[in-house]
């Protein structure tokens, strides 16, 4: 599962079945170019938020970073420390009313549809067939070729480079979501990886314990409370929701490479897009194949994983256990007769 | 500790004192928060920790066949299949016939075991340790675990693996779902199964189709 689930956790999933990256807009990753990044970066640096980000940045990269045990060379993790760390990470807030600012208390509709709410299933299934066809006949062969002709180190480097290119947009969205701490992390990663990380080809920030994350404008809209609308598989764009699909429009519109009409810009746009698709698809060859093989119905399996993962992205990893469906609703086969008593006990 | 060889001596400045006091205050506050997590369930944590130790042993078996049968035995022992079966069938659990139930259960058990195997074998060689728990209710507990000794930057370094523990009326605990990073297997299975049933006419007809699909899948 890790490999499989990580596949969905990773931003590359949007890339997996999408041709949107040709425009430099992976469906689930913040889209940017270096130049767009600089512009937004500078714009935000002028706001008061920047001093807070820088303070957080200093804190995060100091020796007392949030994950002290992660810096320990000792492989034997102090279980109490990890315990506290994980509690912080996954603890749901106390009863929703108590903490109105928590992401976990966002209206459910903005966080996302449930994994089998799919009013446009007929259309979506048709589009999914198209996607799968393109995937089987174009993306997977390309990704396999790419794998065959490049060393793993090189591929990892390219993935990191492309991810670093996206980080200014991630930062921008972090800020728009009011996530000062995460913005600080993104900023520090960008600075560290662009400089000592050889322009983003390496990821020294990760080794310092500053893990990366992704944001895109769809997630920002979700945090702002905008409903996701139904799940939709769009022709050539892959799985999404109405909100997240529409959020691609400003992302694409704000990509300066789409406005520079010179051959080098065109070349850069196409290479970035092409590299993004193939590089994003390559690590997912086996995970998606696994899911396809082990599922009874690839479409609904994929939909459920996608929706669950998207929800996690929007909640920024703060798992909302209260939103899980109840196991108790139906009792079980053995004590179905006792269902009524069961309710009384609860 | 660093010494400051100044004439003013080691007396802290006002700023240092304020900083020190706030740090202490923060420490106290954070201790208060972490020492009494909102709703942890020690019994469920212990229960899961013991299973993880067994799982670790199962994965240390020399051959793949032995590893598989080890996992199978664990799944048989700890996963509450009647409970999970009802869950994955969603509303159709209300209409399933006794005959269908008898056919569905063993097939689903086989299917789910295979999924657990595929899932857990990714961790072979890693050790998972329980890191905390959250009560959704007194009967429905999430236990979290993490890979022990993952270095920063490792693929699984920050991965939280969740286990959903159900406590029956009599206090007996069982595992009903597993997930990672907020993505759950039984929820995905429910989504698939309901979809297969609905797309094959729904009701008992749809359930027949699901049973046929499952049977093809697990070669039963």
Image (cartoon, rainbow, N blue to C red):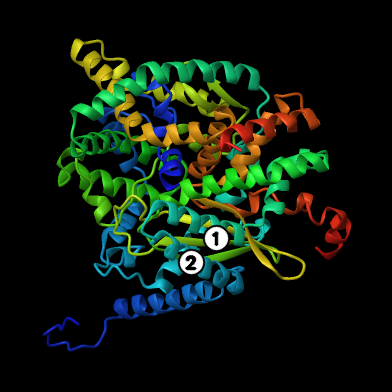
Residue at image x 24%, y 67%? A73
* Chain where mark 2 sits: B
Q: Say few, some or many: other residues with alpha carbon within 10 Å of mark 1 (under 14 / 14 to 19 / 20 or more).
A: some
Q: Nearer the viewer, residue B128 or B69?
A: B69
**Image quarter of the N terminus of chain B:** bottom left
Residue at image x 57%, y 70%? B47
**Image quarter of the C terminus of chain B:** top right
Residue A234 in sight here: no
Name the mark on residue B74. Answer: 1
In the image, is residue B99 above or below residue A81? above
Residue B137 in sight here: yes
Question: What is the spatial separation of the Cα atoms under label 1 and label 2, in whole angstroms?
Answer: 8 Å
* Chain where mark 1 sits: B
Name the mark on residue B54. Answer: 2
For numbered disc 1, what is the local secondary structure? Answer: helix
Q: Are marks 1 and 2 in contact (CB under 8 Å)?
A: yes
């Amino acid at each position: 599962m890790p490999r499989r689930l990580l596949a969905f956790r990773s931003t590359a999933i949007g890339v997996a079945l999408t041709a949107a990256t040709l425009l430099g807009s992976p469906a689930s990753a913040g889209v940017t170019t270096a130049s767009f990044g600089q512009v937004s970066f500078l714009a935000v640096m002028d706001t008061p938020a920047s001093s807070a980000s820088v303070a957080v940045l200093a804190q995060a990269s100091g020796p007392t970073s949030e994950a002290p045990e992660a810096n320990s060379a000792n492989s034997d993790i102090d279980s109490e420390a990890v315990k506290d760390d994980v509690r912080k990470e996954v603890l749901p807030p106390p009863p929703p009313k108590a903490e109105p600012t928590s992401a976990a208390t966002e209206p459910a509709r903005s966080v996302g549809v449930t994994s089998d709410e799919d009013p446009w299933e007929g259309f979506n299934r048709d589009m999914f067939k198209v996607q799968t066809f393109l995937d089987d006949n174009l993306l997977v062969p390309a990704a396999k070729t790419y794998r065959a002709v490049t060393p793993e180190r090189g591929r990892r480097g390219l993935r990191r480079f492309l991810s670093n290119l996206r980080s200014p947009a991630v930062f921008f969205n972090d800020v728009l979501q009011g996530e000062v701490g995460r913005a600080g992390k993104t900023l520090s990663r960008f600075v560290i990886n662009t400089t000592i990380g050889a322009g983003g080809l390496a990821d020294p920030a990760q080794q310092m314990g500053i893990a990366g994350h992704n944001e895109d404008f769809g997630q920002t809209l979700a945090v702002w409370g905008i409903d996701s609308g139904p799940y939709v598989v769009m022709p050539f764009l892959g799985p999404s929701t109405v909100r997240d699909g529409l959020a691609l429009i400003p992302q694409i519109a704000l990509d300066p490479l789409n406005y520079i009409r010179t051959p080098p810009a065109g070349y850069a746009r196409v290479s970035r897009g092409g590299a993004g698709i193939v590089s994003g698809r390559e690590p997912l060859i086996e995970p998606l194949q696994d899911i396809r093989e082990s599922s009874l119905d690839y479409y609904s399996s994929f939909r459920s994983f996608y929706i669950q993962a998207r929800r996690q992205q929007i909640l920024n990893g703060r798992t909302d256990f209260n939103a899980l469906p109840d196991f108790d609703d139906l009792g079980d086969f053995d004590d179905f007769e006792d269902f009524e008593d069961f309710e009384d006990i609860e | 500790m660093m010494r400051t060889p100044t004439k003013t001596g080691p007396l802290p400045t006002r700023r240092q004192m304020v900083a020190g006091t706030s740090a202490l205050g923060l420490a106290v506050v954070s201790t208060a928060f972490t020492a009494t997590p909102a709703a942890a369930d020690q019994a469920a944590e212990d229960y899961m920790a013991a299973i993880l130790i067994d799982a670790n042993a199962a994965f240390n078996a020399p051959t793949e066949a032995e590893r598989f049968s080890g996992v199978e035995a664990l799944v048989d022992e700890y996963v509450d299949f009647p409970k999970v079966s009802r869950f994955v069938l969603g509303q159709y659990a209300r209409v399933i016939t006794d005959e269908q139930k008898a056919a569905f259960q063993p097939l689903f058990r086989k299917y789910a075991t295979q999924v657990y195997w595929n899932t857990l074998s990714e961790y072979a060689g890693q050790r998972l340790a329980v890191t905390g728990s959250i009560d959704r209710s007194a009967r429905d507990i999430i236990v979290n675990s993490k890979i022990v000794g993952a270095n920063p930057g490792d693929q699984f370094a920050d991965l939280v693996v969740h286990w959903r523990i159900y406590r029956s009326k009599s206090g007996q605990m069982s595992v009903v779902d597993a997930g990672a990073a907020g993505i759950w297997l039984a929820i995905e299975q429910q989504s698939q199964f309901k979809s297969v049933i609905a797309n094959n006419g729904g009701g008992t007809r749809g359930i027949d189709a699901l049973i046929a699909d499952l049977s093809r899948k697990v070669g039963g």
